């Protein structure tokens, strides 16, 4: 998979996004097609294509993604009621962008974790 995804270009500031947090390891920005009142994507600045390719060297960034998710959930006012964190992986996981990303979703009851098979 190519490393030159749209998310890498957002991390680098090359294309616009509603960035809500950025530090040395991760960047968080609002999803362009929100599926809940709060829908933020948290990505490692150094691209990892998918969750199937994570290595021990990625642990600092992956751990930071969780602490940033907590911080943003509090900032967005969804921590108390609760929220959902999702990482889709490859084709069966429904991953569209090959730069690992965590979805932070909340602001309403989110329903069952998986839609039922037809
Ligand atoms: P996934 O299916 O897990 O790969 O989710 C990809 C998400 O990325 C999807 O919810 C839509 C979002 N997205 C795709 N392109 C862009 C973009 O250019 N900007 C922003 N902010 N979000 C994007």
Image (cartoon, helix red, strand yellow):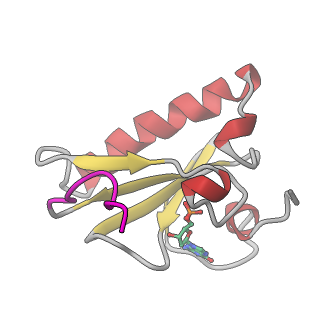
Q: Residue at x 42, y 61 (%)?
A: 40
- Where residue 50 sits: x, y (%)? 70, 46
Q: Is residue 112 rendered to the left or right of residue 1?
A: left
Q: Which residues are magenta?
A: 109-118
- Where residue 102 sits: x, y (%)? 50, 50
Q: Which quadrant is the N terminus positioned in?
A: bottom right
Residue 24 in sight from this viewpoint: no
Residue 9 in sight from this viewpoint: yes
Majority secondary structure of the magenta segment? loop
- Where residue 84 sits: x, y (%)? 31, 49
Query: Among all residues in the image, which is located at the extreme top?
Result: 56
Front one among 81 and 26: 81
Q: Residue at x 38, y 47 (%)?
A: 85
Up/down of 114 relative to 29, above or below: above
Up/down of 63 relative to 1, above or below: above
Q: Residue at x 72, y 58 (%)?
A: 98
Is 113 part of what is drawn in magenta? yes
Q: Is residue 77 rendered to the left or right of residue 103?
A: left
């Amino acid at each position: 998979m190519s490393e030159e995804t749209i998310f890498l270009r957002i991390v680098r500031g090359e294309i616009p996004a509603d960035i809500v947090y950025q530090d040395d390891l991760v960047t968080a920005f609002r999803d362009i097609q929100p599926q809940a009142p709060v829908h933020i994507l948290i990505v490692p600045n150094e691209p990892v294509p998918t969750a199937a390719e994570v290595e021990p060297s990625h642990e600092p960034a992956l751990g930071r993604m969780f602490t940033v998710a907590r911080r943003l959930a509090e900032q967005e006012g969804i921590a108390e009621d609760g929220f959902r964190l999702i990482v889709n992986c490859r084709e069966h996981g429904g991953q569209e962008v090959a730069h690992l990303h965590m979805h932070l979703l909340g602001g309403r009851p989110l329903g069952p974790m998986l839609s039922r098979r037809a």
